[in-house]
Image (cartoon, coloured by chain):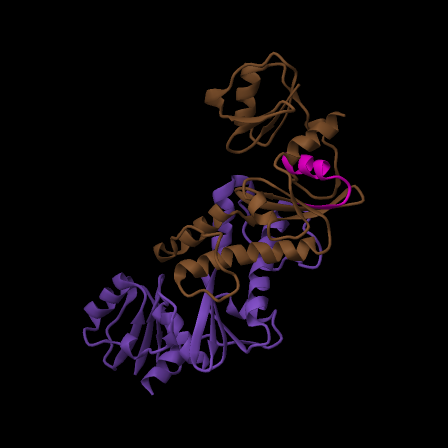
Chain colours: A brown, B purple
């Protein structure tokens, strides 16, 4: 059995052992049963062209929530987390979702680090510096480049601290491992979405 | 005497009583002495074409600081603040500068509200919602639009709280009045930059 998480920039596959990534150009057919979730209709069509029997798992990704517009990948990550705690998925956007007693209580969205760079860049070319996530947060910035990186990293960490509080927290996504290091109880689970899909199938 | 603050999007004028704004297209000549500061060479040239005797006040805007690349408008706002406290200039970017005993200790830059919108938009069209600054911060967001506005406003306020602490704070810029309302000791001074220019001339 193969699981597939179709995201904005790639199709992510998991066979229970390893994970690999494809774009529509590099997709290959599968003989095994394949279950997928998708937030990207174009890539989903590409998968179905090559694997017409691929099964959309979305109807089985059931999460109690009053949040309107919760993406199926966020739902799956919450299922992967379990009944209580916070999921932080740090990618192009940073989504923060709170679970309590098996119910999704709500969520917050922050720009990811690249999107902070985009935001600064959109204001003035003077502010066009890549974000340095290793910036020292103990002392006040002494240059424009430092001031931008400090602003981005500090705002992300403060919002996370406020929401996480004393809750359990699991980080996932490309910048999840890095961010998890700032939280003593922070756990990094690279494939939390697949864990949720696996639980939905169980 | 007329003071002029040449910014990224307009030339701002002040005659001691009222403030008015021009772009290079709508500039008119002046007979009175005119002192200016500028962060926009193109607009500065337009002013000098029409008012060749306009005086660049920048060499007189003296601020003790080890910050590299501090804009002359930020320096002037710090002079306008005085010896101790925090200046928050909330416009297309939100700049936060800390003064202590007449010395500039450093600064932080955050995206302004429009730039947060740009950042979200750059990630996905699903995240293309204007920021609602009236978002309720007491409860967890229950929709994508709420989650984005909460993320932007909350991160700005938390970074401000952290830097301001128990210091005196003066807000300026287009969103300064709105943000000042979140801080019990927050003062809004619409023309803090002109106040700094006035002090530099005194």
Residue A76 located within the stretch drawn in magenta: yes
Along the horizontal axis of the image, is B5 left or right of A196?
left
In this rendering, position of residue A128 left or right of residue B137: left
Residue B100 place in picture, x, y as percent: 48, 79
Magenta stretch: includes residue A162: no
In this view, A124 is above or below A87: below
- List x then y, in percent, for residue A99: 74, 45
User: Magenta residues: mostly which secondary structure?
Assistant: helix
Tell me which segment is drawn in magenta: A72-87
Q: Is residue A157 visible?
A: yes
Q: Position of residue B17 (x, y in %)?
A: 40, 82
Residue at the (73%, 55%) spot, across then down: A166
**In the rendered image of this protein, does residue B179 appear above or below residue A93?**
below
Quadrant in the rendering for residue B38? bottom left
Viewer-proximal residue among B69 and B54: B69
For this orientation, the residue located farthest to the bottom is B202
Left of B53 or right of it: where is A194? Answer: right
Residue at 21% x, 73% y is B51
Work out which quarter of the rendered image holds the C terminus of chain B and state it. Answer: bottom left
Q: Quadrant of the N terminus of chain B?
A: bottom left
Q: Residue furthest right?
A: A101
Q: Position of residue A48 (x, y in %)?
A: 57, 18
* Residue at x-position 45% and y-position 69%: B106
Q: Is residue B90 visible?
A: no
- The correct choice, above or below, for A97 with respect to B17 in the image is above
């Amino acid at each position: 059995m193969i699981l597939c998480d179709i995201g904005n920039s790639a199709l992510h596959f998991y066979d229970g052992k390893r994970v690999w990534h494809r774009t529509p150009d590099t997709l290959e057919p599968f003989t095994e049963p394949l279950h997928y979730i998708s937030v990207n209709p174009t890539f989903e069509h590409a998968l179905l062209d090559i694997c017409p029997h691929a099964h959309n798992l979305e109807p089985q990704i059931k999460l109690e929530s009053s949040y309107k517009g919760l993406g199926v990948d966020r739902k799956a990550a919450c299922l992967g987390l379990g009944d209580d705690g916070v999921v932080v998925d740090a990618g192009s956007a940073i989504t923060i979702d709170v679970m309590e007693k098996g119910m999704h209580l709500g969520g917050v969205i922050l720009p990811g680090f690249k999107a902070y760079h985009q935001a600064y860049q959109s204001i003035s070319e003077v502010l066009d510096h890549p974000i340095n996530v290793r910036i020292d947060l103990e002392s006040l910035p002494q240059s424009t480049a430092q001031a931008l990186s400090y602003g981005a990293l500090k705002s992300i960490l403060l919002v996370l601290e406020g929401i996480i509080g004393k809750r359990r927290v699991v980080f996932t996504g490309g910048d999840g491992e890095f961010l998890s290091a700032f939280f003593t109880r922070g756990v990094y689970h690279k494939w939390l979405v697949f864990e949720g899909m696996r639980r939905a199938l169980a």
